[in-house]
Image (tube, helix red, strand yellow):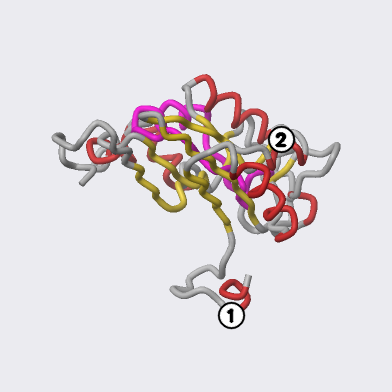
Amino acid sequence: SCSDYNRQREEVCLAAVGDVMLGRYIGKVMNTRGEHYPFDQVRVLLKKHDIVFGNLESGIANDTSAPFFPNKPYNFAASPIAATALKEAGFTVLSLATNHMLDFGPNEPAVTRSLLQKQGLSSFGAGKDISEARHPAILTRNGVRFGFLGYGVAHSRGVYAQRNRAGIAPISMNDIRKDILALRGRVDVLIVSLHWGTEYKNTPSKKHRAD
């Protein structure tokens, strides 16, 4: 058990959580009650793990005054204090391949990655171009190499990274297969994160099962 302090040294414990939303109402709460407030009840548990993975539902932005897609009903972004909060909560690696990653402009992936990197956190799934977005995050713990790849769906093709455009890595089965084959020989454990599905549904669709 990862909560057992007497576990063997050669074991590696990984915790995987779902969407981490630090914008919207939670962002307002953090501004009034402190950036660490959302994780007060789980920090001790998370820090017992060697690797803590989460999906960062919103990017991190310095300026949220002008949404990049003004006609979209929901635009989310966390403030820069979120990077410190994630570090102190015990997170080590985050997927950025979410539909809100460009809500406040094409610089958001770079800002998010930079702020996380300053806290020693790895990220993947989004970047300044498609090459960076598809680039894996690789972490080594107790001699075991873990590789992470991330892909997502979005409301607009403008959110997907291209050769000369920032964004997220789209869910393209051909590209995912290529990336897995390229990474498989470099790591011991390979993890693929897909940000998709139908909101407010408890089971995957037939299409998602088939894919």
Q: Which residue is mark 2?
A: 132
Q: Secondary structure at mark 2?
A: helix
Count of numbered marks: 2
Residue 86, labelled with which disc?
A: none
Q: Is residue 122 above or below residue 13?
A: above
Image spot of residue 165 (x, y percent): 82, 39
Q: Is residue 138 left or right of residue 31?
A: right
Q: Is residue 6 magenta?
A: no
- Circles 1 and 2: CB atoms closer than 8 Å: no
Q: Residue furthest bottom?
A: 206
Task: Name the amino acid, label 1.
Answer: Lys
Q: Residue furthest right?
A: 164
- Which stretch appears magenta? 76-102
Task: Name the amino acid, label 2.
Answer: Glu
Instruction: For label 1, count other residues whose C-alpha is less than 10 Å away and answer few (under 14), some (14-19) or many (20+).
Output: few
Image point (47%, 35%), residue name? 145
Out of 96 and 136, give the one closest to the viewer.
136
Image spot of residue 76 (x, y percent): 58, 46
Out of 126 and 8, give the one closest to the viewer.
8
Image point (73%, 50%), residue name? 70
Quadrant (top left/top right/bottom left/bottom right) for the C terminus: bottom right
Instruction: For label 2, count other residues whose C-alpha is less than 10 Å away and answer few (under 14), some (14-19) or many (20+).
Output: some
Upstream in sequence: badge 1 or badge 2? 2
Q: Which residue is mark 1?
A: 206
Out of 51 and 79, give the one closest to the viewer.
51
Q: On the image, which quarter does residue 95 sit in?
A: top right
Q: State how far apart marks 1 and 2 are (Cα).
A: 31 Å
